[in-house]
């Protein structure tokens, strides 16, 4: 996703950034650029938005600041020259929300880099998520189990029902929709209380955090991109981490995935359990949450990647996800 040079220049002016320093980092849910202010590097993000959605953005920032205050390593925005944590630009018939964050120390870990992709990373990943969930249990806004889509304290962020319905509306394939619809009944039957349900990141895969295994004076992990944080079950966040670890790890066969998943979960939950206590009974539902994630990813990317502009890798990726979904193949 990209924005025009005029919009980039306006964003640069809001933050005192060199308008000639922009380098596209692409981005699925917004236009993301590396840029510089003086000798320091930053990331600027432009999100197309409507005015009625801005209050929800404020709430996401409130949640991020709450997590930061409770020791979670999150990338908080830099104030603009006007003293705001984001700026609103209305140009070219569109409203863009503009944020600036420092360039993180570290990198997105990849399975091919075994210096990063190892048991230590998995443990730290779990520890950070456990700390996030422990903080979420204390967060003032929460959703009552008996009120469905209406949260306490007038929260404007989505819950699981809103997320499910959004993907119903985005899905253009009746056969995929048949696989997606039963999750509404499944989720409706699950318990919700402060010990298992709350506001979660909802997308904590390796491309949404930076990792520096050599960090000494700062935490080795930094969490970014809370754009889809949602009221959901804590096991959802865990299943997202597991899903992306397994599917990006080069494991092809079911046996390979099962073996890697055991190793990953052992280390991940070792870290998680240091920070938060989640009833082990939730892991009985892990296969369903993994399948939920796979179908969600398929629908989201089918919508994001225009059919006429997909490259060969994208076409193969979606074809594989679609075939697995229609066959009902398990992730593990």
Image (spheres, rainbow, N blue to C red):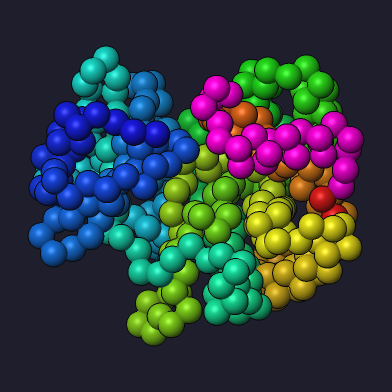
- Residue 279 in percent (x, y) is at 79, 61
- Residue 18 in percent (x, y) is at 12, 49
Which residue sits at x=28%, y=51%?
A: 34
Vertical order, 263 against 230 (above or below): below
The span picked out in magenta is 306-330
The answer to whether any part of residue 14 appears in the image is: no
Vertical order, 11 against 127 (above or below): above
Q: Residue 297 versus residue 230: which sits nearer the camera?
A: 297
Queried whether the magenta region covers residue 331, the answer comes back as no
The C terminus is located in which quarter? bottom right
Which residue sits at x=10%, y=60%?
A: 38
Relative to 7, is 67 on the left or the right? right
Q: Quadrant of residue 321?
A: top right
How many numbered marks, from 0 up? 0
The N terminus is located in which quarter? top left
- Residue 96 in percent (x, y) is at 29, 29
The answer to whether any part of residue 182 appears in the image is: yes
Vertical order, 6 against 33 (above or below): above
Q: Residue 319 versus residue 160: which sits nearer the camera?
A: 319
Relative to 301, is 97 on the left or the right? left
- Residue 97 in percent (x, y) is at 30, 33
Q: Residue 26 versus residue 65: which sits nearer the camera?
A: 26
Which secondary structure class fits the magenta region best?
helix
Which residue sits at x=29%, y=23%?
A: 95
Q: Quadrant of residue 276?
A: bottom right
């Amino acid at each position: 996703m990209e924005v025009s040079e005029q919009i980039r220049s306006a964003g640069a002016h809001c933050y005192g950034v060199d308008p000639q320093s922009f380098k596209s980092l692409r981005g699925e849910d917004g236009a993301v650029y590396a840029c510089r202010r003086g000798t320091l590097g930053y990331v600027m993000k432009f999100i197309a938005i409507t005015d009625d959605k801005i209050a929800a953005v404020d709430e996401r920032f409130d949640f991020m600041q709450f997590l930061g205050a409770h020791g979670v390593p999150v990338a908080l925005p830099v104030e603009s020259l006007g003293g705001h944590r984001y700026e609103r630009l209305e140009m070219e018939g569109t409203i863009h929300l503009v944020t600036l964050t420092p360039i993180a120390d570290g990198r997105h870990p990849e399975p091919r880099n075994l210096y990063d992709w190892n048991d230590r990373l998995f443990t730290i990943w779990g520890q950070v998520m456990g700390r996030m969930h422990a903080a979420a249990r204390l967060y003032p806004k929460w959703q009552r189990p008996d009120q469905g889509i209406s949260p306490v304290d007038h929260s404007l962020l989505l819950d699981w029902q809103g997320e499910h319905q959004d993907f119903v509306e985005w899905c253009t394939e009746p056969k995929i929709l048949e696989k997606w619809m039963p999750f509404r009944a499944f989720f409706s039957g699950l318990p919700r209380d402060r010990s298992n349900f709350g506001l979660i990141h909802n997308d904590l895969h390796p491309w949404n955090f930076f990792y520096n295994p050599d960090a000494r004076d700062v935490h080795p992990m930094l969490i970014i991109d809370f754009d889809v944080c949602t009221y959901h079950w804590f096991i959802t966040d865990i299943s997202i981490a597991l899903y992306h670890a397994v599917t990006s790890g080069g494991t092809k066969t079911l046996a390979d995935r099962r073996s890697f998943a055991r190793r990953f979960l052992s280390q991940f939950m070792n870290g998680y359990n240091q920070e938060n206590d989640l009833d082990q009974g939730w892991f009985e539902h892990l296969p369903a949450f993994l399948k939920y994630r796979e179908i969600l990813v398929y629908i989201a990317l089918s919508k994001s990647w225009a059919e006429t502009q997909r490259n060969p890798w994208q076409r193969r990726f979606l074809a594989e996800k679609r075939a697995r979904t229609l066959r009902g193949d398990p992730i593990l």
